[in-house]
Amino acid sequence: MKDLFAVAMLVGIYGLLSASFFVAMDAVDVAFTEASVGAGISTLLMFVVITMTGRSEDPVRHKPLLALIVVVITGGLLIYGTLDMPYFGAADAPIHQHVAPRYINDSMQEVGVINLVTSVLASYRAFDTFGEVVVIFTAGIGVLALLSVVRRRDDDELIDSVNDSMHEQHLILRIVTKMLIPFILLFSLYVQFHGDFGPGGGFQAGVIFASAIFLYTLLFGLSTARRVINQSLIRLIAAIGVLLYGCVGVVSLLNGGNFLDYNVLSSDPIAGQHLGILLIEWGVGCTVASVMMIIFFNFAGRQEEQQQAKEKEKS
Amino acid sequence: MAFDIDTIVELISAFCLLIGSFLCISGGVGILRFPDFYTRMHAVGVTDTLAAGMILVGLMLQNPEALVVIKLVMILLMTLFINPTASHALAKAAIHNGLLPILDDKEGNKTENNYQESGSSNC
Amino acid sequence: MLIAATIATLVVMILAIIRGIVGPTLYDRILAVNMFGTKTVLLLSLLGFVMGRPEFLDIAIVYALINFISVIGVLRYSDSFQFIQPSPESKDKEQ
């Protein structure tokens, strides 16, 4: 298939299929994250990129037969290697022996949240989650460093006139979207705070929040969205999210425990765990939402700049 | 058969699920067999929303717990808003970019190959 | 009856994928993806009930929103496409 647009959409379908697999395997949090990130945001970002690079694939310059043979041999070797592994989900597999019984048995007494995934992610393995948040933040900084666009003032009036003419075209969509966006924002806050009791948590909530802003940007134009969401505020919030996470760790150090040990945050260990999990999930949500917005605004800003340059060439 | 309220509710729920599945499958058959994009969109747009509504109502009657019913009502309202809007946006974009439907000309013969999409879609 | 509805939804999803691969124009494919998305919402709700875990409804809500945003995104960006050979007559039709 040479049409990149169709390939991007099939990738979206693939993301959905894997979310359904995760649901069938009873892994609800992972399915949640896959549905929101893999099937939604990645597809949108790929579309933005495809509009900039062109719609068809370049003609293939080498013979694909050799690559196919290498892939088949490697895949065959990998499958042969997995034949030795224990069956999927067997109770005596090594990964189920060391720490998993302790998490499953003691999580309710030690941490006190109902959702086991949240307690493992945010309390037992909080340091790994800290690394994930820093990686996301670094990705945002990378996009800012490579792709950020310096805006000129006089483009705003030009874009405003285009916006008014677009208003007639997309009237129905705009009205329906105006009704949906507050609901999506509220739902992202629900997912953020409901992470203790059901599937959810900071990552998914940040992605849903950012996708509400994407919807607004798609229909109302990039310049209007830039005026609504202040760009430097977004960068500040991204940094504040990571800082909040680190500060929780430092405060527990100052209180006499280990780094990111929540038991010493409050008088009662269970209350300390709840407080710690709440704060770090809030930090994760802030950073993920702002970094997604930074990435999208910069991609779309580049695309708009390229389009304006082409229109100036034609006229 | 005892006609208590539980049995009746279960019967209504099963009936709604059955109608929903039937509409769903007919939409799926429609998307494969109709000749033109606009006719396919008609099939999908009509049957999708109604099938979703019927299946969700059937599910609501299965488990009358408060939070679950509220969430199902939210999904139903969102589907009722979103599906027609998406169909409208799709049709509008297709007309805007030059895709014409297959129409009859004056003698009653169907005009063939009215796809005037700009750009190639060779795969 | 729940299992029958689940199987029906799966069958329709497969039919939609077939249209997504075959469909001659781009808009057929967008339509197929949209239909796949709404059927996934239904499938997730049904699976949640079959497995007895109503937490899946959250995922269904998220997926309905994401589907909508993706379709709107595709349509907005297909307006401003840089085609390989832009044909002037379709631009005249827009005026």
Image (cartoon, rainbow, N blue to C red):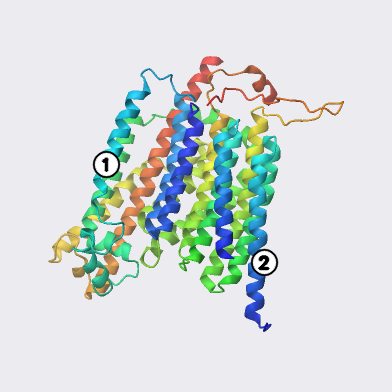
**Label number found at residue B15:** 2
The amino acid beneath tag 1 is: Leu
**Label number found at residue B93:** none
The amino acid beneath tag 2 is: Phe
Image x and y of residue A80, in percent: 26, 43
Q: Residues within 10 Å of mark 2 (few under 14, many from 20)?
A: some
Please, what secondary structure does the residue beneath circle 1 have?
helix
Q: Quadrant of residue A197?
A: bottom left
Q: Quadrant of residue C23?
A: top right
Please, what secondary structure does the residue beneath circle 2 have?
helix
Residue A146 seen anywhere in this rendered image of the structure: yes
Q: Nearer the viewer, mark 2 or mark 1?
A: 1
Tell me the chain of label 1.
A
- Asked if B7 appears above or below A79 in the picture, the reply is below
Tell me the chain of label 2.
B
Q: Looking at the rendering, in which quadrant would you find the C terminus of chain A? A: top right
Q: Quadrant of residue A192?
A: bottom left
Q: For mark 1, what is the residue?
A: A78
Residue A154 seen anywhere in this rendered image of the structure: no
